[in-house]
Amino acid sequence: MGSTRTVHLAVYDTLADWETGYTTAFLAQNGYTVRTVGPDREPVTTMGGLRVQPDLALAELRPEDSALLVLPGAGLWDAGDELAPFARTARAFLDAEVPVAAICGATAGLAREGLLDDRAHTSAVSFYLAATGYGGGARYVEADAVTDGGLITAGPTEPVALAREVFGLLGVYGPKKLDAWYRLFHGSDPSAYEVLEGEDEG
């Protein structure tokens, strides 16, 4: 893992808007720069109809320039091989020991690439990934989000858990603040405010 404070968010047509908002917003508030990476530099349109102009094309992205690659879900993950190059890039990141976070349909893309065969992981449901024909079914975990080494996976209903795992892996918050952040945004626990406003122990 490099010393860079730049995180790369993959963007592509049909991107699921809600899945990475907590992750990118709180990384940006904690000193990280978030840059968007598209298939090329042409604008993409999310599932919610937002138009996003990528900062760079996938071919320009290098693991050594990144602290993390975030792969959101999208309808395109299950509609063919159009997004397969992003899964191949995820392999390059993991090979270079730069973390990858994948949610929803992106987990199926990683399964097809063989990246989940030997790593603990999760997704929407086990049979969703089984339909890819991958070899990692025995490593599937029923959990909101799973971190195994440098790979984080989560299902489509767990954007807060995805963010929690990212913040833990990157050391954005110490353990007490990380727990409080999750309690606040996942469970609306008002007692978490006091911890978040205090000094971080980590």
Image: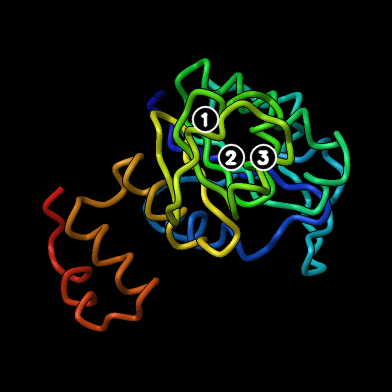
On the picture, is 104 further left or further right than 68? right
Measure the C-alpha gap from mark 3 to mark 2.
28 Å
Q: Which residue is mark 3?
A: 130
- Name the N-terminal-most of marks 3 and 2: 2
Q: Looking at the image, what colour scheme do you see?
A: rainbow
Q: CA distance from mark 1 to mark 3?
A: 31 Å
Give SS at disc 3: helix
Residue 139: x %, y % from top left: 47, 33
In the displayed structure image, the side of residue 68 where residue 58 appears, left or right: right
Residue at the (49%, 39%) spot, across then down: 121
Question: Mark 3 belongs to which amino acid?
Answer: Ala
Circle 1 residue: 66
- Upstream in sequence: badge 1 or badge 3: 1
Spot occupied by residue 142 in the image (x, y as percentages of width and height): 45, 51
The correct choice, above or below, for 81 with respect to 51 in the image is above
Pick the front one: 87 or 118:
118
- Mark 2 or mark 1: name the one nearer the start of the chain: 2
Real-space Cα distance between discs 2 and 1?
7 Å
Residue 134 x/y as whole percent: 67, 29
What residue is pinned by disc 2?
Answer: 8
Q: Nearer the viewer, mark 3 or mark 2?
A: 3
Secondary structure type for disc 2: strand
Quadrant that contains the N terminus: top left
Q: Which disc number belongs to residue 193? A: none
Residue farthest bottom in this picture: 190
| Number of residues whose C-alpha sits closer than 10 Å to that of mark 3, classed few (under 14), some (14–19) or many (20 or more) | some
Q: Quadrant of residue 18?
A: bottom right
